[in-house]
Amino acid sequence: MSERLTFTLHELIAELDAFADSALQAGWGVTFNHFQFLAVLYDHEPVDMTTLARCLGVTKAAVSKRVPALVEDGWITAASQPGAGRSILLSLTDKGTALVRDAGEVLEREFAAMLTHPSLAGDPIDAPRMNAQLVALTAFIQQQPAPGPGAVHHPQETLA
Amino acid sequence: MSERLTFTLHELIAELDAFADSALQAGWGVTFNHFQFLAVLYDHEPVDMTTLARCLGVTKAAVSKRVPALVEDGWITAASQPGAGRSILLSLTDKGTALVRDAGEVLEREFAAMLTHPSLAGDPIDAPRMNAQLVALTAFIQQQPAPGPGAVHHPQETLA
DNA sequence: CGCAGTGAGTCAACTTGTTGACTTAAGGTG
DNA sequence: CACCTTAAGTCAACAAGTTGACTCACTGCG
């Protein structure tokens, strides 16, 4: 395990996602990616494709390609409303809502149980506080100027 | 920003990676993905493809496909040693080593500066401690039994 | 020697995402 | 009304990973 916080974060996320994926596959036969799409939609519905893409952190083209299959399989609905340009509003079906609620509840419970497990009692994690710290850090990074060539101190001309 | 720690972690990682990618593109003309490959190799060289793939969290096929281009561009060397089956040992060239050292140093410095920036002074982050906590949590999740169908409490038969 | 087994790497087919060009519906302005 | 401009979605080409089948070098054992 690494001593570098950034490496640790990547490893933690990978483990978390793998765990969630296993649980979702076993309990509901869906992937984590699938669940994530519906869960983010749940928090924002009804929402147009472009906005949902931003929330998911992918391009609108990626969302556009996934929508037909999700509608086909009865997870979401897509409705274009007159007078709103080409905008298409996405919403969850009852089936989609039930998945997000039920699976989401289970995942949150499992994760909360991990955080309070006795094996971590040596230095227990204060989840709300850590969350607040990481939210603040994330917001700060977002504000950082994209480091242009000048912001980096020794561009390696010697390498080329 | 979310109140759920798992969401916050994903958002933080996305911001961190985007920041690192900008810095690397601006300063060295390489992507974060490229840097990450070399940085992990740096910590393990010389190493065969299969082991490196496990360290990177990808399949050996993915590594196998990237190697020719990396050799071609002078970042790494690939040497198959007699008497070791089909194993191929990967190492960094001087150019690759210099990139990992120089860019890695800049990235670490930038990240450390973020962690200690006055704007986070309200509840400063104790990086070593947080790292230790997250390492412990990661290790714990790895030990978790992959949650089979029985481990999930209410598989939604009512949904199908 | 001959030959099945193992482990590393590679290949083809597929998945999921990105980019940049394109289409189309509104909206504003002459 | 005619003409840009803008914004949303879609498409084709490409990029990077995965899976499962395959090749090949070595190993052990009869």
Image: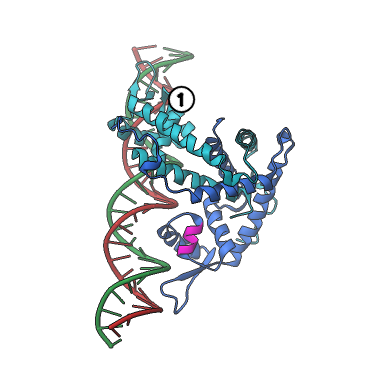
Chain colours: A blue, B cyan, C red, D green
The percent position of residue B22, horizontal first and vertical second, equals 40, 45
The percent position of residue B21, horizontal first and vertical second, equals 42, 43
Prevalent SS, magenta region: helix
- Disc 1 residue type (three-letter): His
Residue at (71% x, 44% y) in the render = A113
Query: Where is A62 relative to A48, above or below?
Result: above
Highlighted magenta segment, given as a residue range: A50-55
Q: Which residue is mark 1?
A: B44
Q: How many marks?
A: 1
Residue B47 location, quadrant: top left
Which sits in the foreground, A5 or A11?
Answer: A5
Task: Tell me: B113 left or right of B61.
Answer: right
Residue at (30% x, 35% y) in the render = B69
Is residue A152 something that shows in the picture? Answer: yes
Query: Where is B126 relative to B1, above or below?
Result: above
Which sits in the foreground, B26 or A116?
Answer: B26
Query: Where is A47 relative to D12, above or below?
Result: below
Quadrant where the N terminus of chain A is found in the figure: top right
Which sits in the foreground, B98 or B66?
Answer: B98
SS at mark 1?
helix
Residue C4 location, quadrant: top left
Task: Tell me: B81 left or right of B11.
Answer: left
* Chain under disc 1: B
Q: Is residue A51 magenta?
A: yes
The percent position of residue C16, horizontal first and vertical second, equals 44, 52
Is residue B151 something that shows in the picture? Answer: no
Quadrant where the C terminus of chain A is found in the figure: top left
- Few, some or many C-alpha atoms within 10 Å of disc 1 (few <14, some 14-19, many ≥20)? some
Which sits in the foreground, A97 or A89?
Answer: A89
Task: Tell me: B20 left or right of A44.
Answer: left
